[in-house]
């Protein structure tokens, strides 16, 4: 029998940066009591995105932060008003996705 569950997670952040949402997602999977399937994660924020990475080494997150920081530098002049405030985040989102799918067991 095919089962499906939809829920909304609210994750508080402290501004720009990577945030580990693993515990919140795992808790929703536990509550659903679905043992095997495909989890689809979607983020509604227009200047945020999702990245799936291993987390065995805590330095990986720091390395990713540095990588994206160098790739999308902040010292660039923009002409749009919106860009002055959040163009760095918007450019990072252009490189990453707002939707991810991952199988689970």
Image: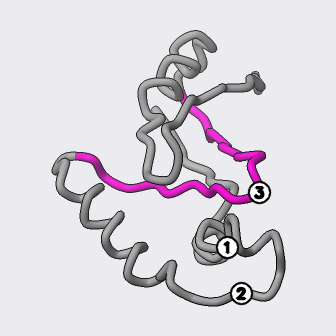
> Quick one: quadrant of the N terminus?
top right
Q: Residue at x 79, y 88 (%)?
A: 79
Q: Vertical placement of 89 versus 76: above or below?
A: above
Q: Which residues are magenta?
A: 36-55
Give the alpha-carbon distance from disc 2 to disc 3, as whole Å: 18 Å
Q: Nearer the viewer, residue 102 or 86?
A: 86
How far from the left and from the top, in percent, is residue 19?
Answer: 44, 43
Q: Is residue 38 left or right of residue 51?
A: right
How far from the left and from the top, in percent, is residue 74?
Answer: 51, 78
Q: Hey, which quadrant is residue 71 in on the image?
A: bottom left
- Which residue lies under the disc numbered 1? 87
Q: Earlier in the sequence, mark 3 or mark 1?
A: 3
**Does the residue at mark 2 contact the one at mark 3 (Cβ under 8 Å)?**
no
Q: Secondary structure at mark 1?
A: helix
Q: Earlier in the sequence, mark 1 or mark 2?
A: 2
Mark 2 neighbour density, 10 Å: few (under 14) some (14–19) many (20 or more) = few
- Which residue lies under the disc numbered 2? 78
**Does the residue at mark 1 contact the one at mark 2 (Cβ under 8 Å)?**
yes
Q: Vertical placement of 97 versus 99: above or below?
A: below
Give the alpha-carbon distance from disc 3 to disc 1, as whole Å: 11 Å
Frontmost of labels 2 and 3 is 2
Q: Residue at x 55, y 22 (%)?
A: 29
Mark 3 neighbour density, 10 Å: few (under 14) some (14–19) many (20 or more) = few
How far from the left and from the top, in percent, is residue 22?
Answer: 43, 34
**Does the residue at mark 3 contact the one at mark 1 (Cβ under 8 Å)?**
no
């Amino acid at each position: 029998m095919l089962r499906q569950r939809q829920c909304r997670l609210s994750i508080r952040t402290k501004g720009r940066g990577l945030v580990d949402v693993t515990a919140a997602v795992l808790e929703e999977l536990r509550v659903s009591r679905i043992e095997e399937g495909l989890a689809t994660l979607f983020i509604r924020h227009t200047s945020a995105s999702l990245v799936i990475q291993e987390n065995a080494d805590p330095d990986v997150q720091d390395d990713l932060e540095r990588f994206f920081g160098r790739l999308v530098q902040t010292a660039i002049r923009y002409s749009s008003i919106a860009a002055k405030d959040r163009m760095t985040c918007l450019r990072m989102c252009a490189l990453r996705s707002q939707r991810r799918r991952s199988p689970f067991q």
